[in-house]
């Protein structure tokens, strides 16, 4: 399916011979590595038990500062009694192109699986599928053309949420959030968690891919 609504089944297709000795193979390898993204991720509690807890905490604080600077949410009255979805801070190791360790990376995600029904037309992203991209790279290699890649940092956080979504930030993450911005202390609930209303399309929401 060429519109990106379905992923190809079976094993990863073989690499075109034209690309075999090309630097474009690096791009292909990076894409294949993304298939292992979720297997390589840890919860923040798991990561903090390891030997690199200081580096993980620094990455956690950096992620929360990013949430604040991008105005991702606004705090909600602790007595709010409406529908609430969970959240999770995920942690993974980032590696350089040569395979050497680069840094620890935290990503704050929303529990979109608790949102309820969201129609597929509101959640399907317009993503280029792998086979189409590899065809373009093959043509570029045959024509000896240069390929330019553009990356939009935190692309999801540049788009607004179009529905009302209230999310719970658990006690552990809320404590770090309050250390960064003490004004959040007034919104703590009895269990130490904080409720926020999402303003930006946080990773994990069903419609975030469509919104970006």
Image: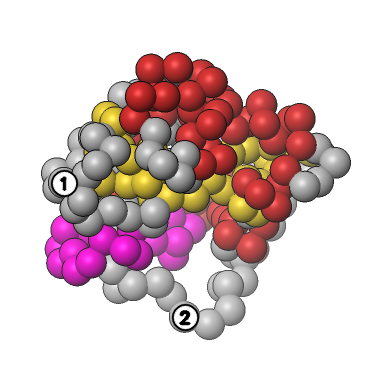
Residue situated furthest bottom in the rendering: 10
Residue 62's image quarter? top right
Q: Which residue is mark 1?
A: 164
Tell me which residue sits at (67%, 31%) in the image: 57
Residue 130's image quarter? bottom left
Q: Quarter holding the N terminus? A: bottom left
Quick check: can you spot residue 210? no
The reply, left or right, for residue 50 in relation to residue 27 is right
Looking at the picture, the colour scheme in use is secondary structure
Task: Give the magenta-colored segment's residue range.
Answer: 112-134
Categorize mark 2 by other alpha carbons within 10 Å: few (<14), some (14-19), many (20+): few
Residue 160's image quarter? top left
Q: Which residue is mark 2?
A: 9
Q: Decide which of 90, 95 is in the foreground and name it.
A: 90
Image position, residue 93 (x, y; %): 70, 44
Image position, residue 14 (x, y; %): 61, 71
Q: Is residue 101 above or below residue 64?
A: below
Q: Decide which of 204, 28 is in the foreground and name it.
A: 204
Tell me which residue sits at (32%, 55%) in the image: 85
Q: Decide which of 36, 53 is in the foreground and name it.
A: 53
User: SS for tag 1?
Assistant: loop
The reply, left or right, for residue 141 in relation to residue 84 is right
């Amino acid at each position: 399916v060429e519109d990106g609504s379905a992923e190809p089944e079976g094993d990863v297709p073989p690499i075109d011979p034209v690309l075999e000795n090309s630097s474009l193979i690096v791009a292909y390898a990076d894409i294949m590595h993304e298939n292992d993204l979720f297997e390589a991720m840890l919860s923040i509690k798991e990561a903090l038990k390891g030997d690199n807890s200081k580096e993980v905490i620094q990455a956690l604080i950096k992620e929360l500062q990013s949430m604040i600077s991008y105005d991702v949410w606004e705090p909600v009255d602790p007595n709010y009694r409406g529908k609430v979805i969970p959240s999770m801070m995920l942690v993974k190791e980032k590696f350089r192109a040569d395979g050497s360790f680069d840094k620890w990376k935290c990503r704050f995600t929303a529990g979109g699986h608790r949102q309820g029904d969201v129609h597929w037309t509101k959640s399907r992203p317009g993503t280029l599928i792998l086979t189409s991209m590899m065809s373009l790279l093959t043509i570029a290699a045959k024509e000896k053309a240069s390929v330019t890649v553009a990356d939009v940092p935190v692309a999801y956080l540049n788009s607004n949420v179009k529905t009302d979504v209230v999310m719970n930030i658990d006690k552990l993450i809320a404590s770090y959030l309050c250390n960064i911005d003490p004004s959040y202390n007034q919104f703590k609930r009895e269990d130490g968690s904080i409720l926020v209303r999402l303003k930006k399309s946080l990773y994990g929401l069903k419609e975030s891919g469509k919104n970006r």
